[in-house]
Amino acid sequence: MSSIKGIVSLTRPYVLLTTTSFYVAAAFLSVNGIPSLIPTILGFVAVVLAIASAHTLNDYFDRQTDKENPRTKTRAIPSGKVSPRLALAFGIIYGLSAVALTFCINLPSVILAFIAIPLPFAYNYMRKRHIPYSFLCTMLAVLFIILLGSTAATGQFLANYILLFVIFGVSWEMGRTLISEVQDVDHDRVNNITTLSVVISSRRAAQLIFVLFTLATIMSVVIGFYGQLGILYIVVTVLTSLWILYRSLVLMQKPTTANAIRMLSRAPKYLLLICLILIITILINTFLFGL
């Protein structure tokens, strides 16, 4: 039983839940209505498996550094709940299954899947050695998830307002990545791990986080206006964004590990609320106004 729980924990269920909201919101936004059921569901399962693969492989490659980090030493592999070999096997199986599912959707989805295959390996091999790779890999991951939502629903990479949603998603993910760096900055500095937060300092990283979430806020509001999503979406989006921006200001004032950990737990809630209100608004418009 503990092995099963360990294998599940490797997929980061909470992070998986929040990240897949990108896909669902993109599918609805790409048609500004209700997307086709079967290809959208197949794409959703493929995204779940791809994210599970990335997280599992991340823990496999980071098993030694996780053992040395007080915050991560209780994870499944360093704590001995799951063997490295088993984690690697599941990571590969998840990834191959995700690619296989895209063959049941359409050609653009298959193309995206094959481009995304090397991403987890590139991220895990290079993210803590060279600063740009951390952001490049996480940005590409979000980009692929959003584009897959669009291609599964429409067969097009950038249908409707997907480009605006990409800017929103990439800004959010870069902010979240920086928060995770700030929470580990002391450990990374001691172990000569070069992250952006180590190089520019936690305070400046927190300032950049505020800028990125501000950009995400602007994009979410612009999507509401151009997509004619209505006053409900705008109000909820603005209130939610003010909340995450306030939390960013708190982190700017005290960019400590404890505040970064709290911020990291709150950031996914912001994403979930934005994506959820977007989907709800589109459903309301579709059923009530036929938009």
Image (cartoon, grey):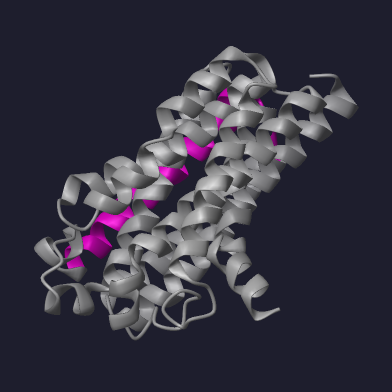
Judge whether residue 33 is colored magenta. no
Q: In screen coordinates, is 285 left or right of 44?
A: right
Residue found 89% across the figure and 28% down from its top: 288
| Residue 49 lies in quadrant | top right
Q: Is 119 above or below relative to 247?
A: above
Residue visible at 65% across and 23% down? 152
- Number of numbered markers: 0
Q: For residue 183, which quarter of the picture?
A: bottom left
- The image shows residue 226 at horizontal and vertical percentages of 57, 23
The one nearer the camera, 7 or 192, is: 7
Horizontal side, residue 32 vs residue 22: left or right: right
Query: What's the residue at 61%, 38% (across, down)?
Result: 97
Q: Is residue 106 above or below residue 252?
A: above
Instruction: Answer whether residue 227 is magenta in the image.
Output: yes
Q: Position of residue 208 (x, y in %)?
A: 25, 55
Left or right: 195 as drawn, with respect to 172: left
Region rendered in magenta: 203-231
Question: Which residue is rendered at x = 19% and y = 72% of the image?
Answer: 188
Please say if 91 is above or below 34.
below
Q: Residue 121: x percent and y percent?
A: 34, 46
- Is residue 156 at least partly visible in the picture? no
By secondary structure, the bulk of the magenta-drawn segment is best described as helix
Specify the quadrant that holds the N terminus: bottom right
Residue 291 appears anywhere in the view = yes
Q: Residue furthest right?
A: 288
Q: Is residue 255 left or right of residue 106?
A: left
Q: Quadrant of the C terminus?
A: top right
* Residue occupying the far bottom of the picture: 70
The quarter of the displayed image where residue 6 is located: bottom right
How far from the left and from the top, in percent, is residue 276? 69, 47
In the image, residue 47 above or below residue 62: above
